[in-house]
Image: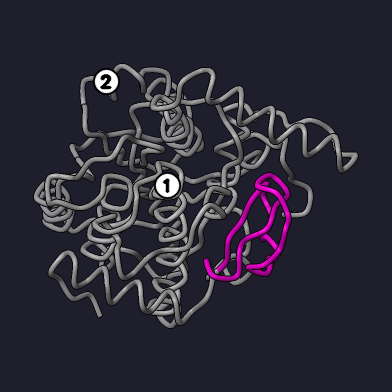
Amino acid sequence: MAQDFGATSTTEDVLSGVSLAGRRVLVTGVSAGLGVETARALAAHGAHVVGTARDLDKAHRATEQARADAARGGGALELVALDLADLASVRACADALKAQALPFDLVIANAGVMATPFGHTKDGFETQFGTNHLGHFVLVNRIAGLMKSGGRLVNLASAGHRFADVDLDDPNFERTPYEPFVAYGRSKTANILFAVAFDARHRARGVRATAVHPGGIMTELVRHMGAGEIEAMMAQINERATAEGKPPFQFKTIPQGAATSVWAGVVADADAVGGHYCEDCHVSAVVPDDSTSGLMDGGVRAYAVDPARAEALWAESEELVGERFG
């Protein structure tokens, strides 16, 4: 049962006794961290996983264990090229998948970047918004027709959505002073809102969408942060926790971090998670926008699951990428 799982549950805990034989899954970002473990766990339980990566050589090395576990578990793992920061690459990947005409039971939009220096994608979008949101927006919408009734979309979000709502008037920081974590927060809020809007469009045909926060995990995602910056952030979080009589923050392991993705994708009740934000293998409570709760206190800001905000972002995203998806 879903309530048996929590913050310390691992992918193997969540998938214990679960056979995914015959399931086909797309996971973006399988060259490091959570993407590798997510793909490994699903393939080890019998799924055919299509993993995407910008650097296929790196992904091939990173998924050696995943392929071995897949062979033992009756699953499979194949790799395809995808650079989410280049919409030509995104469209080529989507077109190749559509040409195969093989359906998907689950799509996990896992890849992303965090706290990057100010920059732009190949198409001129601010790096984090363009990579984390717009790249996935185009990819997922282009292959939406391949998603089977009963299928799901899982968007990797973050508690970092609390740093900022999306800015539909200045998405590329053309007038706003750039702050790496504000940009990250905008992109993670966008990931949640995209799940809300996608769920609203596809639930009638049996396809649901959800967003998940994996928790705090030390992966390559933090490569743009210096050691001192990470330590300062942890000190601030733990100072607040101590003042509130709470235990200090603890990082999750990678298998614990990937657990919520696989739980939301194949274990949880579709109606329970559809259109919602999940963390620690449960559906999160909505926190008012003016709440003073801390980054690690759990919950999702109301602005990140607001259906009207989700529709406004959808329309803005279509304008930015020059495509209509209905």
Classify residue 48 by image quadrant.
Answer: top left
* Residue type for callout 2: Lys
- Of residues 128 and 243, which is closer to you in this image? 243
Question: How many numbered discs?
Answer: 2
Q: Which residues are magenta?
A: 276-304
Q: Using the image as rendered, state which of residue 251 and residue 57 is in the foreground.
A: 251
Image side of residue 315 versus residue 242, left or right: left
Q: Which residue is mark 2?
A: 58
Is residue 301 within the magenta segment? yes
Instruction: Kindly report the distance in space between the C-alpha atoms of the residues bearing marks 2 and 1.
Output: 25 Å
Q: Residue at x 12, y 51 (%)?
A: 123
Residue at 60% across, 70% down: 302
Residue 121: image location, x then y, percent: 18, 45
**Residue 33 is covered by the magenta coloring:** no
Q: Is residue 118 left or right of residue 195?
A: left
Residue where numbered disc 1 is placed: 184
